[in-house]
Structure formats: C-alpha cells, structure tokens
Image (cartoon, grey):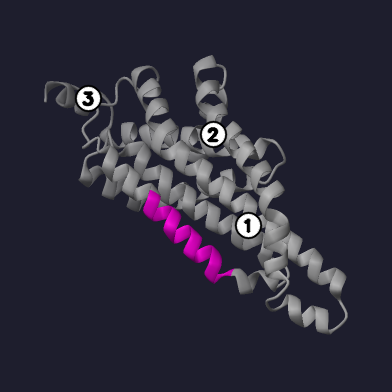
C-alpha cells in the first residue's frame, strides 16, 4: 500500500498547479451536465421501465408498491451515476490523461525515458473495450444487487476494475516497452487494483465524485511512472532511452 499512498499524495500535491485543475475540471463539468440531463430527461422513464419487470412486479403483487418504487429509483440513480462516471472516465482516459502525462513527464518524471509505442489508437481501444466489459458486467450482476450489501459492494468492485483496466495501461503506454508493461502489470496487479478501489470509493462522495475520473487518471500516471522509474533503477535506462 506504500506505492498507493505515494501516488495519492503526489496527486494531491499536483493540485497546487493551476494547469492540472484545468485537466480535472473538464471531465467534472461534463459529468455534472450529463448527470443532470439524464436525471431530468431519463430518470422517470427508466423507473417506469423497471416497474414492469421483476422483482418490482413481485413486490407490487405483495402490496409493497412503495418498496418497488424505492428500489426502482435507487436502481435508476445508480444507472445514471454509472453512465456519467463511465462517460467521464472515457473522456479522461482518451483526451485528458495524455495531456496530464505529457505535463508530468516533462516536469516531475523527466528522468523516465519514453520507450513505448505511444499508440493513441491502442490506448483508445483499451479504454473502449474496458467500458464495454464494464457495462456487460454491470448488467449481468444486476440481479445480485437485490442481495443486502451487494448493491454497494458490486459497483465499487466494478468501478475499481474499470479504473485499473483503463488507466494503468494508458498511463504507461508511451513510456514502457511491452516487456516492461507485462512485468509491471504482473508485479503491481494488487496495488493497482487497490488504487482503483480507493478512487472508486471517493467517487461516491457527493460533489467530490465529479472530480474523480480525472483524479483517477492523474493518480495512475503518478503510480505508473514512479513504478517504471524504480523498475529501471534510475538513470541507466534513461541514458539508454535518450541515446536510442
């Protein structure tokens, strides 16, 4: 967890820079507008659709109309939140993270040589594929959300997986070689998931949650470049990278 705490502390430190706040606020404003729009135009319709399917119909037959509506509204808000978070995460991964990475690579991590493929297409495909898998897992696990407690745990775990799958690769694609990425992914699998889970927990804090997609991207950049720096053991690889 030491690596996770270091990444989080550096993420907070980066917020002292005005330029970083520009990167953070763009997805946040987009997420806010999307959430409000979906709530105004889609929540009622989504609730009505949920009311005609089990288990809502079963609750209605038992005379528990109020509980059916309560669960339908809870499910509707969770769906809106997931859609807004997913869209903001895609925006952060595809457009904002490369800008953050370029800024931090030129300042705090200038000694870490860029030896990767720097493939925008590969990073985009990775993010889109992760989003598709996230949506599929979210839909497949919906019946389990009726089990007490799982309606809180499952979204956290899914968002943690989404964060790790999306941002870990994108943060290192420009700097790490294929062999380095494979090694880092294997050795840091658990800490990367824990970083994703930490950011998933923070995403559920009112107002702060709007900033989390971009802050998640920033924290994974810090974690990834520091892990790569340590795996290369400093200046030797940097010199070779500059020479190449």
Mark toward the viewer: 2 or 3: 2
Query: How far is the residue under mark 3 from the one under mark 1?
Result: 45 Å
Question: In 3D space, how far apart are the residues under numbered discs 2 and 1 (Cα atoms)?
Answer: 18 Å
Q: Mark 1 falls on what kind of element?
A: helix
Q: Reply yes or no: does residue 135 show up in magenta.
A: yes
The number of numbered discs placed on residues in the rendered structure image is 3
Q: Nearer the viewer, mark 3 or mark 1?
A: 1
Q: Confirm or deny contact between disc 2 and disc 3 (CB under 8 A).
A: no
Q: Give the structural element (helix, strand or loop) at label 3.
A: helix
Residue 77, image quadrant: bottom right
Q: Is residue 1 visible?
A: no
Q: CA distance from mark 2 to mark 3?
A: 33 Å
Residue located beneath label 2 in the image: 27
Q: Position of residue 30 (x, y in %)?
A: 57, 35
Q: Position of residue 74 (x, y in %)?
A: 74, 60
Q: Which residue is mark 1?
A: 79
- Answer few, some or many: residues within 10 Å of disc 2's Cα (few below 14, many 20 plus, some between 14 and 19): many
Q: Which residues are magenta?
A: 128-141
Estimate the x, y position of residue 144 in percent, counting from the top left. 63, 73
Q: Which mark is residue 238?
A: 3
């Amino acid at each position: 967890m030491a690596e996770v705490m270091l990444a989080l502390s550096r993420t907070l430190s980066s917020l002292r820079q005005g330029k970083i706040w520009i990167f953070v606020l763009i997805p946040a404003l987009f997420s806010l507008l999307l959430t409000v729009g979906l709530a105004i135009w889609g929540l009622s319709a989504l609730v009505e659709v949920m009311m005609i399917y089990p288990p809502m119909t079963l609750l209605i037959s038992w005379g528990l109309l109020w509980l059916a509506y309560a669960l339908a509204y809870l499910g509707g808000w969770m769906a809106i939140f997931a859609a807004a978070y997913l869209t903001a995460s895609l925006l952060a991964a595809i457009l904002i993270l490369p800008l953050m990475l370029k800024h931090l690579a030129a300042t705090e991590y200038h000694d870490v040589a860029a030896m990767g493929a720097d493939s925008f297409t590969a990073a985009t495909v990775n993010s889109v594929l992760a989003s598709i898998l996230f949506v599929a897992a979210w839909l497949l696990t919906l019946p389990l959300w009726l089990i007490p407690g799982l309606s809180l745990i499952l979204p956290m775990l899914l968002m943690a997986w989404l964060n790790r799958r999306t941002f870990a690769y994108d943060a290192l694609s420009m700097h790490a070689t294929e062999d380095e990425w494979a090694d880092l992914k294997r050795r840091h699998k658990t800490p990367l998931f824990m970083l994703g889970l930490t950011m998933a927990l923070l995403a559920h804090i009112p107002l702060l949650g709007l900033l989390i997609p971009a802050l998640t991207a920033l924290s994974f950049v810090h974690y990834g470049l520091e892990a790569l720096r340590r795996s290369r053991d400093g200046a030797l690889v940097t010199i070779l990278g500059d020479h190449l």
